[in-house]
Image (spheres, helix red, strand yellow):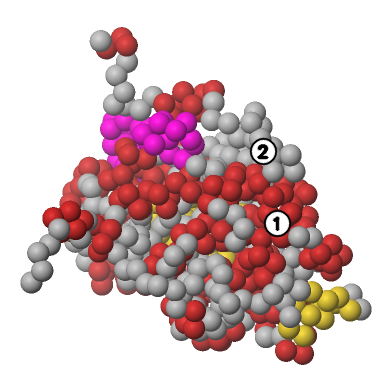
Amino acid sequence: MAKRQKRFEVLEKRAVNKDGFIKEWVDVGLVAMDSPNDPVPSIKIEGGKVAELDGKARKDFDMIDSFIADHCIDVAVAEEAMAMDSNEIARMLVDINVPRKDVVRLSVGMTPAKYVDVLKRLNVVEMMMAMQKLRPRKTPANQAHVTNVKDSPALLAADAAEASYRGFAEIETTVGVGRYAPMNAMCLLIGGQVGRPGTLSQCAVEEALELQMGMRGLTAYAETVSVYGTEQVFVDGDDTPWSKAFLASAYASRGIKMRFTSGTGSEVQMGYAEGKSMLYLEIRCIMITKGAGVQGLQNGSISCVGVPGSVPSGVRAILGENVATVLNDLEVASGNDQTFTHSPIRNTARMLMQMLPGTDFIFSGYSASPNYDNMFAGSTHDVDDYDDYLVLQRDLQVDGGLNPVDEEGVIAVRNKAVKALQAVFEELRLPPITEEEVEAATYAHGTKDMGDRNMPEDLRAIDAMMAKGTTGLDIVKALSKHGFSDIAECVLGMLKQKVSGDYLQTSAIIDENFEVISAVNQPNDYQGPGTGYRLEGARWELLKNIPQAISPEDI
């Protein structure tokens, strides 16, 4: 055996070398941004309709081409946008002297191939500059995953309260056992309002049940309605762009905020990438979303992140898809959720590309549970990383959407949330939450600190609750009856949002006074230094005063 060089022996044990990497493999679509099979940008307009799209005549369109041509591309601006040199458009994205509205106006005239041709001219710093200008809402925010492997309701309510108390504007759960969904949704609804009034919550499960829970007022938004960039993958899901658009309209008509979900690598993972680049296929997903009239998109590779993460420039392509989303004037929840690497250095580097410029939701799932409890297959960052994240905000004077908190405050909101849930369970005749569960969930790190519940009993009770038509109003009544009138008012406030519909606007979040903040009333006005969102004033005072910082008075 050849004698080893000792540095190489040390290096091969590094965490990053546990990751999977592959050289580009064009035939199966393992190429990030620039496949030789990507079409050349082109468009022809005849009789007010798109007759040719990226070199393909209308008679040869697949269903995605047809949907994009008829519902996304604005023929009034298409010829102007397509005639422009891609370098010129790329420079407009970066140029602080070009207002956001000027580039957004052109975006609806661009074809999928034109988007790729523009974005591949930008390096990651230029993409971050573009993101800082293009995100629709002025103020960045964040979203958390709140899950656990036991579907423990007490722990879900406590973790939801802590997550919203720490500053997450949206919280999302899912299930280990499908029938737990309504209970889990209720736990987040109640817990989220304890931590901070106005926190939006959702439960990601099968689409019909998601919609039903939203209509009953158990959830406030949805984002797991998936779209894909090749026809075969769409067909395998028994869907079309039109069926997804119909579903989106069902949510909107019931006053429920929703986003579509997509991400680079999904078509490769499904085996039907057609040899195209991942970014090109993802641009098609973004344009389907725009054409369907949906207010936003969760992308950033999401559950397929290991695929682009394995090829050259793959993480750059992920940022590219986020930029393409906001260029289309859509809200973006920009990924950073599913973990893709063993390396903490690589993990942080991937996240900083969204944190530094700020996006509508920097994470579409920062794990507000320990990673062993994350039912979304683990997240890039979790509860064990809170302090590191807060220090990064402080080091860089960047608003990543989280607040410094003290232990006493966290204990208080966790305890109140579980006690409120306990009262609702009693009133709705659900299996009781014991005092032992209240105590355990208040102080728990995760389900390793929780006992087991009687699952068959829980599931029978959930089925009965749904069968008798329980709604958010029943939760309001239960909270009020048992002395939690403040939380009852907050839950009622969330139900009122479905009537007013204000939070159906692009990039909408709700503050603690139940005022909607969106791209409509707080548009991003960044045009260089001294403009746009600046971390200053009271918000900066809050973020820089982390609990572990020593005060001069203490010396």
Q: Quadrant of residue 327?
A: bottom right
- Main SS class of the magenta portion in the image: helix
Which residue was labeled with disc 1? 87
Q: Secondary structure at mark 1?
A: helix
Q: Is residue 488 above or below residue 173?
A: above
Q: Quadrant of the C terminus?
A: top left
List x then y, in percent, for residue 308: 44, 67
User: What residue is rendered at 24% in x and 57% in y?
Assistant: 15
User: What residue is rendered at 57% in x and 36% in y?
Assistant: 513
From the image, state whether disc 1 or disc 2 is nearer to you.
1
User: What residue is rendered at 67% in x and 71% in y?
Assistant: 113
List x then y, in percent, for residue 480: 45, 44
Q: Quadrant of residue 375?
A: bottom left
Which residue was labeled with disc 2? 526
> Does 125 appear in magenta?
no
Tell me which segment is drawn in magenta.
390-417
* Relative depth, front residue between 368 and 299: 299
Q: Residues within 10 Å of mark 2 (few under 14, many from 20)?
A: many
